[in-house]
Amino acid sequence: MIAKRALALVVVALLGGALNTALGQDLASFEKKVTTRKLPNGLTVLIIERPEAPVFSFFTHVDAGSAQEVAGITGLAHMFEHMAFKGTDKIGTKDYAAETQALRKVEQAYAAYEAERGLERADTQKVANLEKAWKDAIAAADQYVVANEFGEIIDREGGVGLNAFTSNDETGYFYSMPSNRLELWAYLESERFLKPVMREFYKERDVVMEEGRTRTESNPIGKLVEQFLATSFTAHPYGVSGVGWPSDLRSFSATDADNFFSKYYVPSNMVVSVVGDVKASQVMPMIEKYFGRLVARPKPLPLRTVEPEQRTERTVTLRETAQPFYLEGYHKPNSRHADDAVYDVIGDLLSSGRTSRLYRSLVRDKKIAAFSSGFNGFPGDKYPNLFAVFAVPTPGHTTDEMRDAIRAEIERMRTEDVTDEELKMVKTRAKANLIRGLDSNQGLALQLATAQTRFGDWRQVFRQVDNIEKVTKADIRRVASATFVPSNRTVGVIESTQAAGKSKENK
């Protein structure tokens, strides 16, 4: 055992030295390869030259997600993400002038329908008539649609990986193309944010509603997470479902989506990164030509609501015919806080691989859990958030056992120093993960654009590893002692009614 540990430390030391050298070289080379510019309209652009293959990837980062929604329009950030693939006034239409008039009639009909439907004593027949008029207007508008034309152009021109995502904190758009299609990309990507068209909005709204049902209504863990966050956050938007409440998904309009776009999809609230076989001297003029067309508008005001301090433990329990599940979370600062790297280290110690404390204790040794993990930054990290830990019990074991075993490991963090070997391994993994993350053009475009938005400097991607390197044993105990206390804790549990039913039958 002693010999194995000594060998492990030698390997870690050698690997750590190699990674330190690689990291220094990478950062130095990136300094030379990255060109950053803010356009007159406020858009920030990053160009990263990597001529390994004749392709490039990009990432458009919009600093708006579900946290920017308010009551009545929850789910709208995700909804607009879908609409950004529907084309423009030039792409996706047979006759835009006629389509514009038809879409205007759709919105007028929908407003009338919603107004009557929302009355306390609505006239049932009138509601039915207005609904029919609205659906007839949709059918009239649909005749002008060229479905999926935006995506088909990208596919035809060699683009791959066309996709997007919406989180609590942000919305991102990305794909890759051959380098000789760079100007086409600049036109297409800028065009869809220059004048998006809310065509097929209500058909797509049904798609988003179905996604919501899949994630929550038919998914017990999704239901638990939704209720857990609503219990953890009583004031901040992190407590509201990012998928959107069903009543909002059935009610918000294309006009609402257009208003959301106008407020948050402004150049000063966006970063575009391009990574691959490109030359900044050639790319930047193209970006200035096309993205410079985006109209400058004021940057949205920051959120005002701050989650008040939690002063007592909170619990939410779901009784489902499903696998038991245990989850607990603790409030913590955002990713810009000086201790964020400490939380990253704690998360790694608890959860990274088969050497992690939760795996060794709950899965390997006690054999009471099929899986257990902890993570920093839930459900986002732009604002103060949660450090969360969860476990899935094996058959015959309970969520109470998960709770006790997890808290025993958390208490160790509070009262005992981690070992030199553990801390060294965490720091080595952080460096290795960074280097692996730099391999992909797409991953690099995402990381750098996100860091540029969140921290005002893409170099934070590298600095976070430096911050982890500086974390001490005393830091871990200090942060764990302040954070992992009962009054700061929210617990979420799925109790299996199926298991309860079987035990009654056995009796």
Image (cartoon, grey):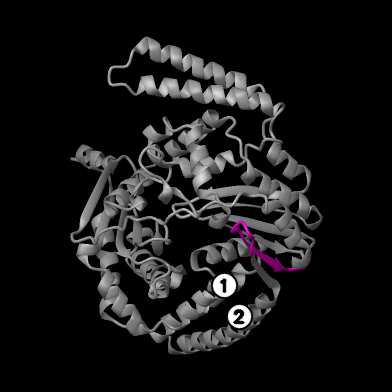
The C terminus, quarter of image: top left
Which amino acid is tagged 2? Leu
Going by the picture, which residue comes out furthest to the right? 180
Cα gap from disc 2 to disc 1, whole angstroms: 8 Å
| Residue 214 in the image: above or below residue 329 | above
At horizontal 70% and vertical 36% (from top left) the residue drawn is 91
Q: Nearer the viewer, residue 30 or 389?
A: 30
* Residue indicated by mark 1: 434
Which amino acid is tagged 1? Leu
Percent position (x, y) of residue 237?
A: 35, 50
* Residue indicated by mark 2: 23
Percent position (x, y) of residue 52?
A: 77, 68
Residue 273 left/right relative to 177: left
At horizontal 68% and vertical 70% (from top left) the residue drawn is 35
Percent position (x, y) of residue 18?
A: 61, 85
The N terminus, quarter of image: bottom left
Residue 224 left/right relative to 164: left
At horizontal 35% and vertical 58% (from top left) the residue drawn is 391
- Compare marks 2 and 1 and give the one earlier in the sequence: 2
* Element assignment for label 1: helix
* Residue 159 visible in the shown view: no
Percent position (x, y) of residue 82?
A: 56, 40
The quarter of the displayed image where residue 73 is located? top left
Discs 2, 1 touching: Cβ within 8 Å = yes
| Residue 82 in the image: above or below residue 26 | above
Query: In this picture, which residue range is highlighted in magenta?
Result: 38-51
* Residue 335 visible in the shown view: yes
| Residue 102 in the image: above or below residue 327 | above
Disc 1 crowd, CA 10 A, few/some/many (<14, 14-19, 20+): some
